[in-house]
Image (tube, rainbow, N blue to C red):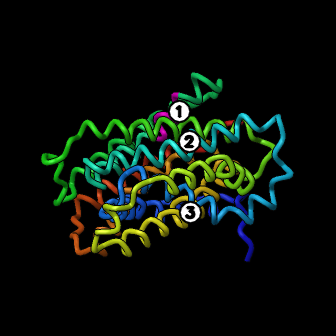
Amino acid sequence: MLIDLEKRPWQWIMLIFLAFIWGASFILMKRGLVSFTNMQVGAMRIFFSFVFFIPLIIRHLKKLNWSNLKSLLIVGFIGNAIPAFMFSTAQTEISSSVAGILNSLTPIFTLLIGVLLYANKVRWLSVAGLILGMIGAVGLITSINDLDIGTSNNWYGLFAVAGTLCYGINVNEIKFRLRDLDGVAIASLGFLFIGPFAGLYLLLTDYSMAAGSPELTGSLLAVIALAFFSSFIAIIMMNLLIKFTTTLFAASVTYIIPIFAVFWGIMDGESFLPVQAFWALVILAGVYLVNGKRKS
């Protein structure tokens, strides 16, 4: 059975699966930071993703031209490179849960940037869905028992906010400026420009701290998994969603991510309370409103 993203059920299936694998990205970053610096984690995430994309880059290279070069540079640097470093830096001081909730700001920035810079029009119901989803995301994260933000420097959350701002720009750029390219081509060609820079940085960086870490192998495997699932696979899926749905529907994946963050927490021995199930339903209600059908 072939996947048909023109059909709404398949769009929802891809959205939920994307949230499932993206929900693990914060834990993977945290484990990568056990042995590596924030800059090394960000650079390795980009470079390993670039390596995975090489066959697709070769396949789609002929689609690169002067008309789409600027937009692909924006996708590469603003949509992928900067957020990779912003979130890895944020998680040196804030918990994975806090980073997850800040990631839910993406649809807000998608909405604002779309209106301000791309002349996008939205319905009041979409705005209501954004607000409801944000309320649900805040409620879900704050209901997690082991959330400990008192011992961290929460100002580092601004790095995560900067990352979500970049995501908002990226979503709109793909939707409104790269209509002639499919999601796979956009993802692969975006990494064409940032992968070599990340590789050069990795060649010049100091690994003395990582070499002495007893968790080196685990941290390296975590970053490789982060690159493969949360960048290579997830970015292709995200770009396909943007092409076949609305920008707000695609960006609303960040509302569902906290639900799966709780799932990964349960797998790690954490508990799940009924109040958390309630906030999860609030999040899904917000996504539904954002995705409501427009009148013709």
Residue 104: x and y in percent read 41, 45
> Would you call the spot at circle 3 few (<14 residues within 10 Å), some (14-19), or many (20 or more)?
many
Instruction: Give the magenta-colored segment's residue range.
Output: 106-112
The image's mark for residue 111 is: 1
Disc tally is 3
Say which residue appears at 59% left-offset and 56% top-offset.
235
Query: Which circle's residue, 3 or 1, is located before the other in the chain?
Result: 3
Q: Please tell me whether residue 62 belongs to the stretch shown in magenta.
A: no
Direction from residue 143 to residue 278 in the image, left or right: right
Say which residue appears at 52% left-offset and 41% top-offset.
167
The residue furthest right is 62
The image's mark for residue 248 is: 2
Overall secondary structure of the magenta section = helix
The image's mark for residue 50 is: none
Inspect the image, locate mark 3, and give the three-letter code of the amino acid beneath it.
Phe
Q: Which residue is mark 3?
A: 48
Between circles 2 and 3, the one closer to the viewer is: 3
Residue 282: x and y in percent read 36, 51
For the N terminus, which image quadrant?
A: bottom right
Check whether the beta carbons of the residues at disc 2 and disc 1 lie within 8 A of each other: yes
Inspect the image, locate mark 2, and give the three-letter code of the amino acid beneath it.
Leu
Say which residue appears at 23% left-offset and 75% top-offset.
269
Q: Nearer the viewer, residue 69 or 134?
A: 69
